[in-house]
Image (cartoon, grey):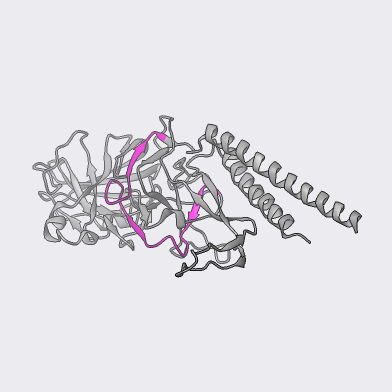
Amino acid sequence: MSSGIFSAVSGIRANQQRLNVISNNIANVNTLGFKSSSANFATVFASTISGGTAPNGTLGGTNPRQIGNGALVSEIASNFSQGGTQYTGRSTDMLISGGGFFAVERIDPFNGNNSGAYYLTRAGNFSLDSSGNLVSSSGNRVRGTSQVSGTSSLTLGRVKLPEQFLITKDLDANGAIVQTHFSPIGTDTSGAGPIFAAMNAGATSQTNTPVSLQSFTVGVDGAIAAKYSNGDIISVRTNAATVAANPSDPTLWRTELIHEPNEGGTFSANNQTATDSGLVDEVGATAVFDGGVGLAVGAGGLEGMQLQIQSASVTNPEGLQYDGNNNFLAAANSGNTDFGTANSGARGSINSGSLESSNVDIAGEFTNMIVTQRGLEAASKVVRTQSEVMQTIIQIM
């Protein structure tokens, strides 16, 4: 049987796969953060009728005579160019401008733990759950970090903005704040609980104020500043003192939780205030005191939470593997995943209140669809022609 019919069939198969890729692109034209793909063809090995010869003293050289055996899909390449911008105005909607990905927890379906696993995604349509966790549309919790860069996270946590908590302030005899504590609503305030037991030396009384989240903003580096009902602001700043002590090792740079009772308070270069208008606490470290005023975190309050969104970049984004729900998985050829904060390295910057739309070029996809359809028709016609030729030969015989 003629090999030509098999060559034509390979063309049908390759063009059909290309149509499948185009169909998926068009289907996801309105999918947030979707990255389009394209199918590229390559020739199948050729059958050599005769090899070429080199020229000699009496005869010129001859070229090889070969017949190709069709086409195949050599690669399905992903296009990671920037998608369009959709402005929503929602604080929980975020867009990465430039390279990079959001990192969200990947839950192990067998034991229910995230086990340090992660998904990467460009879709920033997040929301807050009932516990104050920032989550994706699939319920995966967004990862937070206080690490500037590196392939592992030193202080990995979840981005969490508690809707309500209790602010307890130790006051001296003149009513000045000596120390502030954060605790979950419902903490024992009878005088025997952990808040009263931790009362700072010099305090003569305490105030307990339940507060609720009013609003929050997200900076280009993913740092969150949350404002509560009593006017207090909880935010993060880079610890300039630690940066100065470790200028060549950004993995040691830490961020700090800052409690700012008075909106608009001014912080000095090392994030401490000239007056007692700000309270500073390093994440995961001992409280830093400022003019006798310190910040303590009650167990289960703000302890272990992160107020800076983690982002990541990979060496080869095209090597990532799709896993559904707008998520990517690190794969064999994606290279190292470099975690850290946005607006540094190759991780792009974060814009809050906007979403990234699909980067599908609908006009280009329809053009490719027409070209691919004609390729399918031509290959099908070749199959029919080959069949007619074979039928004619059989009739002659």
Q: Is residue 121 left or right of residue 44?
A: left
Q: How many marks?
A: 0
Quarter of the picture holding the N terminus: bottom right
Query: What's the residue at 37%, 38% (across, down)?
Result: 212
Residue drawn at x 39%, y 47% as measured from the top left: 185
**Which of 270 and 288 lies nearest the eye of the viewer?**
270
Q: Quadrant of residue 155?
A: bottom left
Q: Quadrant of residue 267?
A: top left
* Residue 200 quadrant: bottom left
What x and y, as percent, mark residue 70? 64, 56
Q: Residue at x 58, y 57 (%)?
A: 43
Q: Is residue 149 above or below residue 172?
A: below
**Place of residue 366 in the rendered image (x, y in percent of width and height, measured from the top left):** 58, 34
Residue plotted at (63% across, 44% down): 19
Picture coordinates of residue 217, whole percent (x, y): 32, 37
Quadrant containing the C terminus in the rendered view = bottom right
Question: x, y (%) of residue 345?
Answer: 27, 51
Q: Is residue 26 visible?
A: yes
Which is the main secondary structure of the residues drawn in magenta?
loop
Q: Is residue 142 magenta?
A: no
260 over 45 or under it: above or below: above
Q: In the image, which residues are magenta? A: 325-354
Residue 192 visible from this viewpoint: no
